[in-house]
Structure formats: structure tokens, C-alpha cells
Amino acid sequence: MMIKVMLKKALLPLFVGLALIAVYTPIRTVQYIAVGLMVLESLSFIVVDGRRLLKAIKH
């Protein structure tokens, strides 16, 4: 739980930066890369939460 909180706090500025790049850059390729990185970051949080949920259900 503590690691998850630390990761969220550490990666939040990165997530916001990627969102700003995706919105304001005129270069399509950079927009696609920024959105892709945001999706990967979101999926990693879903996996961490899902693993914790499965562990709670099993016990």
C-alpha cells in the first residue's frame, strides 16, 4: 500500500506532463506516444490494484 502511494505521488507529475504534451503539441507522432505512455501507466496501476484485490479475495 505504501509503495502504491509513493508511486502515485512520484508519477503524477509525469502523467500531467504527458497529458499536457498530448494536448498542446502540434506533432501527431508525439501526441500518440504521449497518449500511449499514459495508457501504459494507467494499466500498470490497474494491474497493481487488481493483484491486491485478488489477494484480498483469496484470503
Image (cartoon, rainbow, N blue to C red):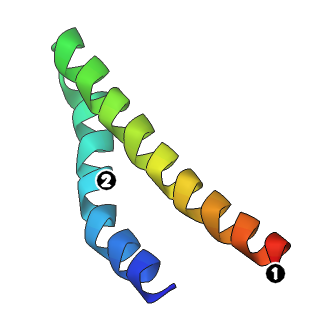
Residue at the extreme top of the image, as rendered: 28
Q: Quadrant of residue 35?
A: top left
Q: Is residue 20 above or below residue 51?
A: above
Q: Is residue 42 left or right of residue 8?
A: right
Q: Residue furthest front?
A: 59
Q: Dots 1 and 2: beta carbons under 8 Å?
A: no
State the residue at coordinates (16%, 13%): 27
Q: Which residue is mark 2?
A: 16
Please tell me whether residue 49 is drawn above or below residue 27 in the rendered image.
below
The mark nearer the N terminus, 1 or 2, is 2
Q: Amino acid at mark 2?
A: Val
Residue 6 x/y as whole percent: 35, 81
What quarter of the picture does the C terminus occupy?
bottom right
Q: Position of residue 18 (x, y in %)?
A: 26, 42
Which circle, 1 or 2, is nearer the viewer?
Answer: 1
Residue beneath disc 1: 59
Mark 1 and mark 2: Cα distance apart in space: 36 Å
Q: Secondary structure at mark 1?
A: loop
2, above or below 19, in the image? below
- The image quadrant of residue 38 is top left
Residue 23 - label = none
Of residues 49 and 32, the one nearer the viewer is: 49
Residue in the foreground of this view, choosing between 40 and 24? 40
Which residue does the image show at 50% across and 57% down from the upper left? 45
Looking at the image, how many numbered discs can be counted on the residues? 2
